Amino acid sequence: MTASDVITYTALIGFLLGAVVALHGWVNRAVALMATGLAIAVPTGVLSLIMLLP
């Protein structure tokens, strides 16, 4: 496993955790949780997409 793989998988895990936090905030109508989840999910999702490019 290369360093690039580690970064990619870590970013994907961060994206999934951020998405879960955002959905939890959406279900409970908590704006702070939604914002926190999006603040985690968006950058890590972009990073994982960049790392997955050939």
Image (cartoon, rainbow, N blue to C red):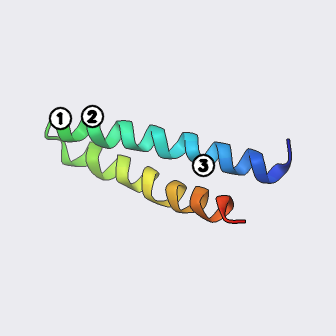
Which residue carries the number 2 mark? Answer: 24
Q: Residue at x 67, y 60 (%)?
A: 51
Lower position in the chain sequence, tag 2 or tag 3 = 3
Say which of 32 and 11 sits in front.
Answer: 11
Q: Are marks 1 and 2 in contact (CB under 8 Å)?
A: yes
Name the element at disc 1: helix
Which residue carries the number 1 mark? Answer: 27
Q: Amino acid at mark 1?
A: Val
The numbered mark at residue 47 is none
Q: Are marks 3 and 1 in contact (CB under 8 Å)?
A: no
Q: Position of residue 12 (x, y in %)?
A: 57, 45
Q: Position of residue 54 (x, y in %)?
A: 72, 65
Q: Amino acid at mark 3?
A: Ala
Q: Are marks 2 and 3 in contact (CB under 8 Å)?
A: no
Lower position in the chain sequence, tag 3 or tag 1 = 3
* Image quadrant assignment for residue 52: bottom right
Say which of 8 and 30 sits in front.
Answer: 8
Q: Residue at x 35, y 38 (%)?
A: 21
The numbered mark at residue 11 is 3
Q: Amino acid at mark 2?
A: His
